[in-house]
Amino acid sequence: MGRLRAFSQQLRSSYELLVLVLLLTLCLPSQETEKLALLRGVVRDSQGTPIAGATVHLQPADPTQTQTVLTNVQGNYSFVALRGGVYVLRAELAGYTEARIASLFVGPKEAKNVDLILLPTNTPASQSSAAQAPQFFDEPQFAVAGVTDTTNLGGHGSDTIVRTRETLAKETVSLSKTPANAAPVAVIEAEKRLRDKVEREPGSFEADHLLGKLLDNNGRARDAIPYLERARELKPSDDENSYDLALANAHAGNDERARVDAEILLKHSDQAEVHHLLGDVQEKLGNSLEAVREYQRAAEMDPREPYVFDWGSELLLHRAPEPAVDVFTKGNRLFPHSVRMLIGLSAAWFARGSDDQAVQRICEASDLNPDDPTPYLFMGKMQNAESASSEQIVERLKRFVDRQPENAQANYYYAVGLWKLRKATPDTAHTERSESMMVESGLVESMLNHAIRLDPKFAAAYVQLGILHSERKDYPRAISDYRQAIQADPKLEEAHFRLAQDYRKVGDADRAAAELEIYNQIAEESAQAAERERHEIRQFVYVLRDQPPAQVH
């Protein structure tokens, strides 16, 4: 009866809330209502069963404005008419441990889905998890608790910005992949000696194991597998060989075999490197939730730089920027001289919509090693997605050009940065400034032309040059620029769109219509491809799990 009364009260309060929201919506100016956001989700138990009657609290910066709702019979909760900002979200119910997200970002006009998991307080797992969990954090730890398939990215601004956030996330992941080096003469000689030993001693575990490992380490995984399998037959209990065999299968693309081997090995050799390998394999198999759990386990057991970085990258790749920020922040504290850890932290802040934080971290990354081009390329992509540039970024991009004057991308990104800074200052501000802007405009054009000389297929540089000429009303040159961009990259949407605009300005309506039709077709194909990918990559939903203070040495 008590539960029924709670549901009845919930229904009445939900109805009253709906009426109130409608009244507020009618009363607010249209500019304000357009910016209101929605947060919803499902509260479940550890088996995935929805929990009815759970209390869900949403607390903004001002705790007095906390909102509270009860989940319905399907476990659903929702908060409507929210303003963008950072909230604390928590769910509770008698007999369960509290689920809490301490820093949940909700953007303006965003419809965000966040599911929460409540664990029973009387289960052995919940009672002993804190004592058994490996220590890494010195404060509550992010633990992935479920997955929701959603295309809502929580992005801010145009679709260009959203796509840039996704691109940077993928490129962050690629930083952990190092290409195999070509085999030197010494390796070739070692291979010959081992092959001779395998022929002389066909029952030698050591010879088969070492030859297989050597081949795999030098990019010949398929050749390595028969030797490692024979070594396993000779000595099934050798964990190192079992690991090397699973690794070779992963390198050869035999992901399911690698997964089975790694899971068997974990039963009697619970090692961080095996969890990390299993994370790689689960990711390739499309098992994103299992992958992030394995990466997390590896990083907690052995918080070395590659393991922490890969854990944060996996979260970022699957659209969980808040916990990715947390992991990369801890990684930056452990490895303050890691350039890629700061790049990951910058990409996570950028994905979260915190551009100032993203700029600060990527600048710190470039300052750690000013000769490393990777941070500059990241900041250039971030800059391209925004309507204005940062003076901090432009300053670093100038350093990029100074150190690598024959790098086409360095010249291009610095030119774009100068152009955006110039556009951000009104021409009427001061005579001196206007003259300075004319000089900068000439410098921008010179650098774009230099980038094109260095890379004649640099389509984006042609487009930016066309934008500059179009603004000067030199439409014939702008049209020529855009056509060269299209010749370099026929699928470049912006080139077709701007070419259509300038054809219209010179009175060539037929060509303008033709280019606009091409643009619409490419844009539709691009949007469909992006939408398919967003469905394939599932967004992680996470909860906070209290942990004792970590002892990281």
Image (cartoon, grey):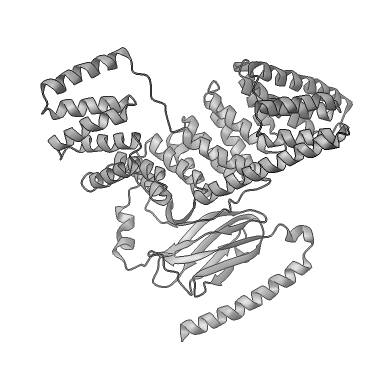
| Residue under the image location 68 percent in, 33 percent down | 390
User: Of 279 and 507, which appears nearest the observer?
Assistant: 507
Q: Quadrant of residue 299?
A: top left
| Residue under the image location 31 percent in, 61 percent down | 125
User: Of 546 and 469, which appears nearest the observer?
Assistant: 469
Name the spot of residue 383 as percent of width and height, x first. Answer: 66, 34
Name the spot of residue 65 as percent of width and height, x first. Answer: 63, 65
The answer to whether residue 152 is above or below residue 1 is above
**The residue positioned farthest toward the top in the image shown:** 185
Name the spot of residue 317 as percent of width and height, x first. Answer: 50, 44
| Residue under the image location 61 percent in, 32 percent down | 379
Note whether residue 433 is visible.
Answer: no
Quadrant of image for the C terminus: top left
The answer to whether residue 224 is above or below residue 522 is above
User: Of 214 and 328, which appears nearest the observer?
Assistant: 214
**Left or right of 224 on screen, residue 85:** right
